[in-house]
Amino acid sequence: MSDKLKPGSLLVLFAVILLAPVIQDRLSEEAIKYVEDNESAHEGMPMEWDGKQVFCTLFPEDFPHAEYSTGVTMIDSRGSTLGVNEEYNGTGACVGGFEGFTQGMDFMLNASEVVGNSLYVGYDVGEWGPFVHTIGGINSNNITGDFSSASWNLEHNGAPSMVGIGDLVMSDGDVILWRISTW
């Protein structure tokens, strides 16, 4: 009986080793917990981001992003996907877990670069500073519908920003969020 046990044990051990990455990914997806504080700009984001800097983009329902069209994908500061919060209000992506950025524009460009071209930020610099017109391939000038105009709007810690991204001073724990507004 011990001769049969050894090959069987080796077979099971080999299978576990081969399946370890798949098992770890599944456990990570299941273990992710989100902040559930209605007063916090971090609501709906991974718990480990509480107190860290986060860059989010929500895409228009009628103009979805090819990669981020279901729920909001949570991506860490190294570019690894942590999970998708399908109960978040909208579709898009959040890149978080950053610390130490003080300038809004520098932070946004650095955070968007973590995921490559999927959240590319296009902007023009004018008299009033940087004007963001494109995020993740969605150009606000190409948004059409039953309205006269559209633009990307910046929120800072859950409220409309009082300054543009070029003048935004960041602190640890800040969340910036971009979404299309129409009028």
Image: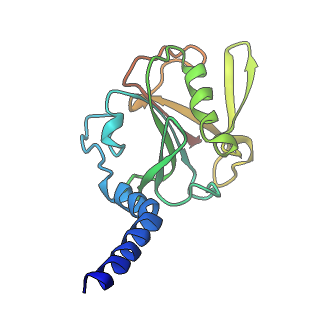
Residue 145 in percent (x, y) is at 66, 55
Residue 144 in percent (x, y) is at 70, 52
Q: Is residue 165 visible?
A: no
- Who is closer to the viewer here, 25 or 166? 25
Residue 25 in percent (x, y) is at 42, 58
- Who is closer to the viewer here, 116 or 164? 116
Say above or below: 65 vs 55.
below
Q: Quadrant of the N terminus?
A: bottom left
Q: Is residue 30 left or right of residue 170?
A: left
Q: Is residue 144 left or right of residue 155?
A: right
What kind of colouring is applied to the model shown? rainbow
Q: Quadrant of the C terminus?
A: top right
Q: Is residue 115 visible?
A: yes
- Who is closer to the viewer here, 155 or 111? 111
Q: Give residue 16's quadrant in the image.
A: bottom left
Say above or below: 125 vs 65.
above
Say above or below: 97 vs 172.
below
- Who is closer to the viewer here, 128 or 28? 28
Q: Is residue 25 left or right of residue 136?
A: left
Number of numbered discs = 0
Q: Give residue 62's quadrant in the image.
A: bottom right
Residue 46 in percent (x, y) is at 35, 43
Q: Which residue is depicted at the point 36% across and 43% down?
A: 45
Q: Is residue 23 left or right of residue 140?
A: left
